[in-house]
Image: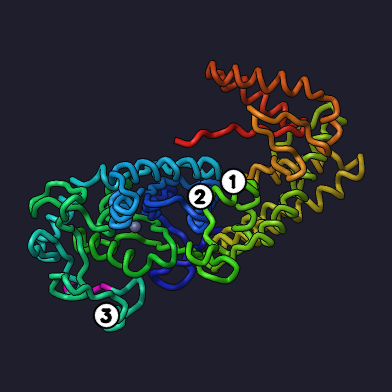
Amino acid sequence: MMVSVYNSLSRKKEDLVPCVPGKIKMYTCGVTVYDDCHVGHARSLYIFDVIKKYLEYRGFRVTLVRNITDVDDKIINRARQDGVAFDEIRVRYIGNYERDLAALGIARADVEPLATENIPGMIAHIGKLIAKGAAYVIDGDVYFSVRLFKDYGKLSGQTLDEMMTAVRIEKDEKKKDPLDFALWKKSKEGEPSWPSPWGPGRPGWHIECSTMSMHYLKTESLDIHAGGLDLIFPHHENEIAQAEALTGKPFAKYWIHHGLLTIDGRKMSKSLGNFYTIQDVLKQFSPDILKLFFLSAHYRSPIDFTFDGLKNSRKALDKMAEFVDKAHAARRGIAKIRPLVRYPVELQEFRRRFEEAMDDDFNTAQGLAVLFDIVNSGNKLLSSSRSRGVALQACRLLLELAEVFGLKIESASHAQVIDASVRLKTAPQAGPEAAALLPEDVKRLVQERQVARQKKDFKRADEIRDYLKVHGVTIEDTRKAG
Ligand SMILES: [Zn+2]
């Protein structure tokens, strides 16, 4: 079986065949660090994390590069608005972004380059475009000549006339054609700037991605370029133009775009008061709940974010966690589970269906449905002592497949989440084993774990965390901001 993906470039599903067999070079457009990340960012970051994990599950070696845009008009404006230095804004929001990624439990990309660390590469790229006649300099600014690039519009499927109506025509711009876009912007008084052959300035947003993706993936043709649907035009169209005008080769083989997120049916905006940061949501719902919510829709579909939707996901997650708890409790009744090299035949069918769903353009909603079928079936198997061994294998399979989705299934909402430094409580309904653990024991263990962490004895710290988890006590380490 092949993995098939919907390619925005061809507008159809295609078998995923990377340039080099077995290896996938993937780039996704990352965040611009001028504010805290919101739930729409969480969906984007998470969905591409799942796609990467599934491709790895399928045996591909995936290299993911996800940039951080840390020079941009939005950052400059934010600094001006707050009356602080440009560097202060970028450093603050890079920190917050990294904190959010960790809180969500989303894996780091293999490379997370900062735009500001790659200016010389961008200057070299722009210089070559000028030398080829694809770009021109006017008074310290450099523009890309869109009409000279014959394939312009191939990703968004628009004609030049259609695009003309979409571009904003700024009065004071000196470019030759409204469609042309800036590769290098001359800096104004008080703006961050870097020296260049065209005078001090800063790169345009689009050039960052073309330059950094090819540089860090060490190729002129990426396998997968991913991003939100809202980036197709002009951002991705421009990335293609800049890269292909330079190399003459197809910039990316597959373009994967996720659908956008609305809140209660409306566009998320601060003025409407329906703007939720990742931190806002994680105050009330665990990362697993948020992930389950995202998985319930196809990544290409729009998704309407509602708190009712999250509550439903919490119920569903509880069902999963309860099964895992029961299976863990049942394990104690059996001296040893026979380690199986292969899952029993009745369970292999679940894996086949999971793969079938995910091979079909990452149909996570169907993949998730298979996980719940495992839970239902596992619960039935648990009810009879004769099938308990298979039930435990079902639990193992569930956890294995859930890992593709980055789910930990440890935070059933009934299990108390304790702040290691403040509250110490055992879960009221955490299964039969929890009763054996007295609050004093928990306190002692948590203290021991803190000492272990201070000594950087993470093995012992993890052992204690796992032990407590089995007993229904979940530890969440407090993350200090900054
Ligand atoms: Zn980009």
Looking at the image, which is closer to me, 433 or 361?
433
- What is the three-letter code of the residue carrying label 2? Asp
- How far is disc 2 from disc 1 in space, using C-alphas? 8 Å
- How far is disc 1 from disc 3 in space, using C-alphas? 42 Å
**Magenta span: chief secondary structure:** loop
- What is the three-letter code of the residue carrying label 1? Gly
Look at 55% across and 68% down and name the residue there: 301
Query: Along the horizontal axis of the image, is 222 left or right of 13?
Result: left
> How many discs appear?
3
Magenta range is 148-152
Look at 71% across and 18% down and name the residue there: 444
Q: Which mark is residue 164?
A: 3
| Image position, residue 195 (x, y; %) | 12, 47
The answer to whether mark 1 is within 8 Å of ligand 1 is: no
Look at 23% across and 75% down and name the residue there: 169
Query: Along the horizontal axis of the image, is 48 left or right of 142?
Result: right
Label 1: which residue?
406
Could you tell me which secondary element the residue under label 2 belongs to?
helix
| Image position, residue 62 (x, y; %) | 44, 46
| Quadrant housing the N terminus | bottom right
- 150 magenta-colored: yes
Looking at the image, which is closer to me, 330 or 77?
77
Residue positioned most to the front? 83
- What is the three-letter code of the residue carrying label 3? Met
